[in-house]
Image: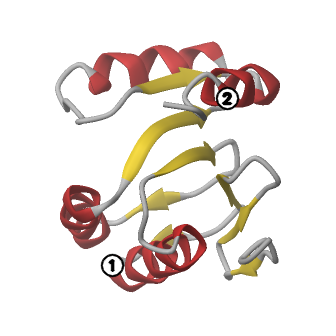
Amino acid sequence: MANTNPTELEFATVFRDKNDIIIITMKDYRKLDQYDVININLAIRHKTDNKPALKLLDARAAWSMDKKAKERAKLEHSASVTKARAIVVSNLIQATLFRFLQGFDKQGYPQQIFTNWDEAYEWLLIFKEK
């Protein structure tokens, strides 16, 4: 299968697994800047061949984004091709905060927040055939 090899970035690992799910695992890192956002999105696009994809973001590491990175992420987000996204966070407090903030940012695809990686993965598999 093409593009299964992981792409290692300083702050994340991106790969496509046997179920064609794009798995993004964040690493402990300083604040991401706008160029980091561009780099990770290029890696994701390469793994998806610019086609709609299921994405699992493991955001449990210690990282954050500066203001320009957040602005860039919004631009990249609008251009992304996502069928569904599962986000895994460290704890229930983070999950609750993400769910609250998610209410203000409507996506054109299903998105769910989890504290358990396996549950997040199983949820994405629901969308595999859609």
Name the side, left or right, on which 17 lies relative to 98: right
Percent coordinates x, y for residue 70 in the rendering: 27, 60
Q: Secondary structure at mark 1?
A: helix
Residue 76 position by quadrant: bottom left
Which residue lies at the image location 82% right of the left edge and 53% below the top edge? 18
* Quarter occupied by residue 125: top right
Q: Quadrant of the N terminus?
A: bottom right
Packing grade of label 2 (10 A; few <14, some 14-19, many >=20) is some
Residue drawn where x is 53% and y is 67% of the image? 48
| Residue 64: x %, y % from top left | 48, 57
Give the CA distance from mark 2 to mark 1. Answer: 31 Å
The three-letter code of the residue at mark 1 reads Gln
Q: Position of residue 99 (x, y in %)?
A: 39, 18
Nearest the viewer among 29 and 88 is 88
Q: Which residue is mark 1?
A: 34
Between circles 2 and 1, the one closer to the viewer is 2
